Amino acid sequence: MLIYREAELADLPEIQDIDTYYVLHTSLTLMRSPPPLETNDDKWSDLKNSGLPFLVAVDNTASTSEKVGVVGYTYLSPFRGHLLSYAPTVELSLFVHPDYRSQNIGTSLLHRILELVNYGNVHHRVELNTDQETGVEDAIQVNARSRVRNIIVVIAVDPEGLYSTEWLKTWYIQQGFKE
């Protein structure tokens, strides 16, 4: 049985295992070598502090000897977070453990995160600075919150690799995204 919930610090090693698989066997992550576990620690902490969701799908029937608990994850991260005009826009990341593909886990994770956004429940911290030229502070808030309104998905093009991205693009379009 699968459980969908917010990611926890204890989930990060299994998320790292999923990441490592996709880095080593595909071009989908756009990375050439797996990042250290601390990278996921920092990402999880940043997302938790910013108010953006980081969801996991957990197989609670897996025994500890099988070592697969987290079977998929998704999160939203700021898109060009240093530019205030992009505050309502986030980027989606979604990965499913290779042994659990084609079981609608990715679709379920996507629908859960989209539901949070569609109901207006996702706001994230936007750090703004005082205008140094004019010194205007009252028009600018530090740690303001911005409601998420736009989600961008970046897909690596790999027409000949193990995971041809044409199906992935089609899948996102079927879920309501536009190219």
Image (spheres, rainbow, N blue to C red):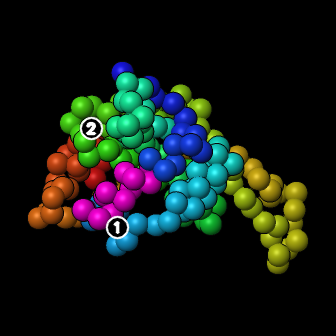
Overall secondary structure of the magenta section: helix
Residue closest to the eye, 107 or 130: 107
**Picture coordinates of residue 16, whole percent (x, y):** 44, 54
Residue displayed at 11% across by 64% down: 160
121 on left or right of 76: right
Q: What is the quadrant of the N terminus in the image? A: top left
Q: For the residue labelled by badge 2, is the local secondary structure a helix, a strand or a loop? A: helix
Amino acid identity at mark 1: Leu
Residue 115: give its label. Answer: none
Residue located beneath label 2 in the image:
100
Residue located beneath label 1 in the image:
30
In the depicted structure, whether residue 107 falls above or below residue 40: above
Amino acid identity at mark 2: Tyr
The magenta stretch spans which residues? 15-26
In the depicted structure, whether residue 52 falls above or below residue 159: above
- Circle 1 packing at 10 Å, graded few (<14), some (14-19), many (20+), is few
Q: For the residue labelled by badge 1, is the local secondary structure a helix, a strand or a loop? A: loop
Residue displayed at 27% across by 31% down: 104
Magenta stretch: residue 105 in it?
Answer: no
Magenta stretch: residue 17 in it?
Answer: yes
Eye-nearest disc, 1 or 2: 2
